[in-house]
Amino acid sequence: MATITSAGIGSGLNVTELVGQLVAAERAPSDNRLNAIETSTKAQISAFGSIKAALSGIESSLKKLDGTGGLPGRKATVTTDAGFTASAGTSAALGTYSVIVEKLATAHKLQSAAVTAGSHVGNGTLTLQVGSGDAFDVTIDAGKGTLADIRDAINSQAAGKGVTATLVNGNSGQVLLLSSGTTGAAGALTVTANGGDGGLSALTTGGGMTEVTAAQDAVVHVDGITRTSSSNTLSDLVDGITLTLTKAKPGEAFTLDVGSDASTLKASMLGFISAYNTALGALRTQSAAGGEGKTAGPLSGDAAPRSITASLRNAIGSNYAELNALGLKTAVDGSLSLDGSKFDAAIAANPGAVKSLLGEDADLGKNMRDMLHNYVGAQGLLADRGKSLDTRMKTVTQQRADLDARMERLEASYRRQFTALDAMMAQMQSTSSYIAQQLGALNSR
């Protein structure tokens, strides 16, 4: 049976408005209750999310102190205009080295004789080889024998094979340059020609090509020890040190000094302090008690933030003497700060001080990592609380659906009742009118 949604049929009674008001009044308490639960739950989910992100920040900061990250780095200092640059890793030994850059590694470059641009040089087949690698052919078709044609053929047919061709237009004419893509003696170019009209012989290494740059290995001396290399970057010459040769300075010795560099370690330590303070701040904000004009946090009264805060502060407090020796200080609210000068002095005296405290194998470092994992891990406290809150949100959603269904039934019931009332009132009005008419007729006789 179709639902009647019109206003009063004949009584003037507004059924739709009355039903709407009654249903709204019936629904309001449940709606308000569910809205309050939903708002509170969403705020708690967000609050725990903020806390988890902050604790994960501490985890990330501790990872930077794992392994050699917990030790001061190395800084390579090179004499000005030494002909090389250097970088040092944490495995580099502290010390001073004497370095002479005798030769730079260079890539082989060949040059043809100058010819008039656009003039025919030759056709046939050029065979090119880089060092002892596989030889490959480049075909120069008849009618395609200019230097520009030959350049295009080499760059197209020899693409990716370690040879590039380019043209230089000078006062004497146009010149073809062939460059090896491999530095060092092993990258020497060999060019031969055969077939065609014989003109390509002018472009062979035994013919008209001259050497612009030799295929040469780098030669460097470190503390009198000689090393040759096909590359100008040497990462295995001295343990932990990478040398990049930039200019040959035969016979000139320059100093390379490798010293301790605690700047990266200090930055990592400051990162840990910042992450720790951020976490304390998040815990404090989300669990604020409120009162006296202050806004209560979403987790006010929840034991979890208090427990996490206590664990963090206890971890620091139980090792405070050692941390203080590194320059760490605590404020009244538990936040940390670092005395940079004291830290530098402590690391200079004991380079392993941070690693022995906060490294992954150190007692404090391991305990903090385990504690944080128990909170932010997949099976940790915050994950459990998140699941509980998600379940609560699903319950609210289901209760809303149930409320909607109940209100639909209530609305239908009210409509039936008021529609019946409306019909009855209309009938009564009709009867009243009829009686009035009859009485009027009697009175008129």
Image (cartoon, rainbow, N blue to C red):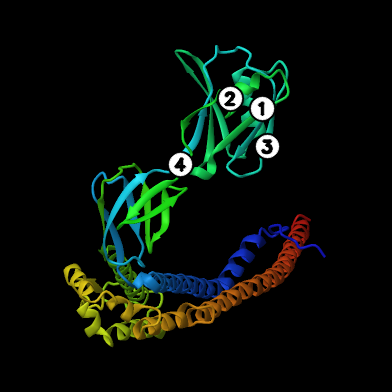
How crowded is the residue under tag 2: few (<14 C-alpha within 10 Å), some, or many (20+)? Answer: some
Q: Earlier in the sequence, mark 1 or mark 4?
A: 1
Q: Amino acid at mark 2?
A: Gly
How crowded is the residue under tag 3: few (<14 C-alpha within 10 Å), some, or many (20+)? Answer: some
> Would you say the residues marked 1 and 4 are in contact, meaning their CB atoms lie under 8 Å apart?
no
CA distance separating discs 3 and 1: 11 Å
Q: Secondary structure at mark 3?
A: strand
Nearest the eye: 353 or 26: 353
CA distance separating discs 4 and 2: 21 Å
Numbered badge on residue 216: 4
Numbered badge on residue 207: 2
Please tell me whether residue 282 is drawn above or below residue 112 in the rendered image: below
CA distance separating discs 1 and 4: 25 Å
Q: Earlier in the sequence, mark 1 or mark 2?
A: 1
Numbered badge on residue 193: 1
CA distance separating discs 1 and 2: 10 Å
Q: Residue at x 56, y 33 (%)?
A: 164
Q: Earlier in the sequence, mark 4 or mark 2?
A: 2
Q: Position of residue 190 (x, y in %)?
A: 59, 35
Nearest the eye: 384 or 445: 384
Quickly name the residue at label 3: 136
Q: Amino acid at mark 4?
A: Gln
Judged left or right of residue 34, residue 244 is: left
